Amino acid sequence: MQKALELYYAKYNRYPNSGSCYQSSDSDFVKSGGSPGYMCNSVDTFKNGGWIHDRVGSVQTYNVLAEFLTTTPVDPQQKNVAEWSNTELADGGTYFYWGGYSYGGCEDFYILYYGLEEENGLHEDANIAMCDGTSRGRVWNNIAVVGNTVN
C-alpha cells in the first residue's frame, strides 16, 4: 500500500483525498463521533475492486491505486461493519486510510491504520510527525500506523 501511494504521488504530485470516501453510519468510527467523509476504509468504501478513492473538483474516481496494485489489500479477517474503537481495531478486521490534503502544516500527507490480532508494541511512538511538529495517528497496543508527509 505504501509503495502504491508513493507511486500515485510521484505520478499525480499528491495523495488521494480521503474526504471523497463516505463511511456507513454503521461504521464504528462514525458512531464514535468521526465524520463519515473523513477516512476511506476497507469495508464501507470498497468499490470497483478497491477502497481508496479520490475526488478532483466534482469528478469522483474509485480504486485509484489500481494502476499500481494488482489487488487492493483487505484485512484477512475482514468484518462486515467497519470497526474503529481501540478494542475492535485491536482484533483486526478493517484497514483505514486518511490523507490527501493540506493538514498539520504539511502540503500533503497520508496515514494508514490497521488492526493487528496480536500486540505489536508500537504504542504512541508510531504516530506520524506532521510538518508543524504535532503528531497524528491513534495508536493502541494492537494497531499499526504508517504514513508520510510532504512539506
Image: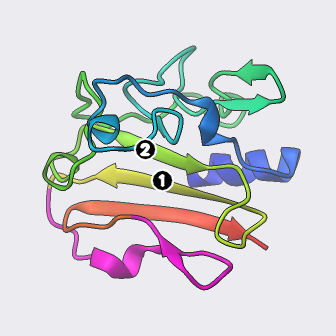
* Figure check: 134 above or below 15: below
User: Which residue shows up at 81% across the image and 21% down it?
Assistant: 58
* Figure check: 137 above or below 42: below
Rendered image quadrant of residue 134: bottom right
Are the two marked residues, 1 and 2, in contact with CB atoms closer than 8 angstroms? yes
User: Which residue shows up at 25% across the image and 25% down it?
Assistant: 81
User: Which residue shows up at 33% across the image and 44% down it?
Assistant: 33
Rendered image quadrant of residue 2: bottom right
| Side (left or right) of 119 relative to 8 | left
CA distance separating discs 1 and 2:
6 Å
What residue type is disc 1 on? Leu
Q: Percent position (x, y) of residue 82?
A: 30, 32
* Figure check: 42 above or below 98: above
Q: Which residues are magenta?
A: 118-137
Q: Percent position (x, y) of residue 118?
A: 14, 59
* Figure check: 76 above or below 1: above
Q: Secondary structure at mark 2?
A: strand
Q: Which residue is mark 2?
A: 96
Q: Which residue is mark 1?
A: 112
